[in-house]
Image (cartoon, rainbow, N blue to C red):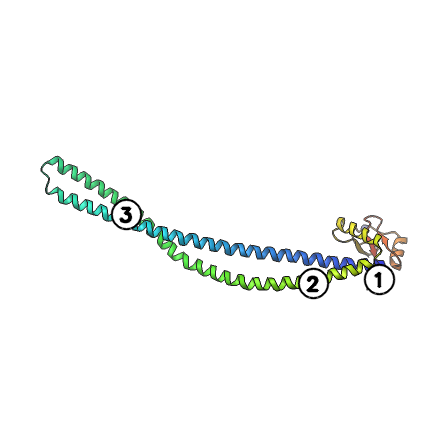
Amino acid sequence: MNENLSLLVELQKLDLEIDRDEKERKKILAEADRYIKEIEELEEDLLDKEAQLKQTKTEKRIKEGKIEEIDLLIAKHEEEKYKVKSQDEFAALEKEITLAKDQKEKVENLLLELMEKEEDLTNSIPLLREKTESGNKNREIKGKKLATYLDNFTRTREKSEGERKNLTLNLNPIFLEQFERLKKTRDGLAVISTKNGACGGCHVKLSFSLMGRVGKGQGVVYCENCNRVLYCISDNK
Ligand SMILES: [Zn+2]
């Protein structure tokens, strides 16, 4: 095969590898980001629930205190009922007692809600804590794996860049420029093999004379339709 042509084939192969590795790297980094975000959300949720539990306990104590207060008030009024001198005073006390009892019922209902909330939180927090802890442990393991991967990636990338430089140094600059330009508009495939007498890229049938030139592999030949550089697969073996 013509030297420039084989360099182009090599260069494209290398570039496709670099692109593939880069896509893989982005995917892996995005996955790592997602995982970290997941753990952070778990941690936030845990902190939030712990704060809610603390708050619920405080509110519960306040309501319990309030009930005690109301109970004392009712007991006081009950006692006073025996000391009153008129029917009106008695009725007023009865009214006060009824009001206090109504209020107590309201506070008791609120207390019941708080108790249910406390129970829910007490049940869900340990599981959430466990998930957060195991998530953080995994995060450490994943972090180490990622560091190793990135190390390998950097080494591979440096090696590829070195190889690429060597290839481009030996390649005719005009071909290199054409190659870079075509690569952008042809999905990274600037060089393509022929297939059953047609261009492997755009599938347009090639003329007999063009096929002949490609078959000989003596120069850089372009597809008349898509401008890709053509080579014969048997020539590349
Ligand atoms: Zn073509």
Q: In this view of the protein, which residue sits in the foreground, 130 or 162?
A: 162
Extreme-top residue of the structure: 88
Q: Earlier in the sequence, mark 2 or mark 3?
A: 3
Q: Across the whole image, how many numbered discs are drawn on residues?
A: 3
Residue at 52% x, 63% y is: 138
User: Disc 1 or disc 2, which is closer to the eye?
Assistant: 2
Residue 196 badge: none
Q: Which residue is mark 1?
A: 235
Residue 208 rendering spot, x and y as whole percentages = 89, 53
Q: Secondary structure at mark 2?
A: helix
Residue 84 rendering spot, x and y as whole percentages = 10, 39
Is residue 37 in sight in this rendering?
A: yes
User: Disc 2 or disc 3, which is closer to the eye?
Assistant: 2
Q: Which residue is mark 2?
A: 156
- Mark 2–mark 3 distance (CA, rounded to whole Å): 69 Å
| Rendering quarter of residue 127 | bottom left
Left or right: where 104 falls relative to 188? left
Considering only vertical position in the picture, is 43 above or below 86?
Answer: below
Residue 108 badge: 3
Give the amino acid type for the residue marked by disc 2 in the picture.
Thr
Give the amino acid type for the residue marked by disc 3 in the picture.
Glu
Residue 188 rendering spot, x and y as whole percentages = 75, 53
- Quarter of the rendering occupied by the N terminus: bottom right
| Rendering quarter of residue 25 | bottom right
Q: In this view of the protein, which residue sits in the foreground, 147 or 198?
A: 147
Residue at 66% x, 56% y is: 23
Q: Earlier in the sequence, mark 3 or mark 1?
A: 3
- Mark 1–mark 2 distance (CA, rounded to whole Å): 29 Å
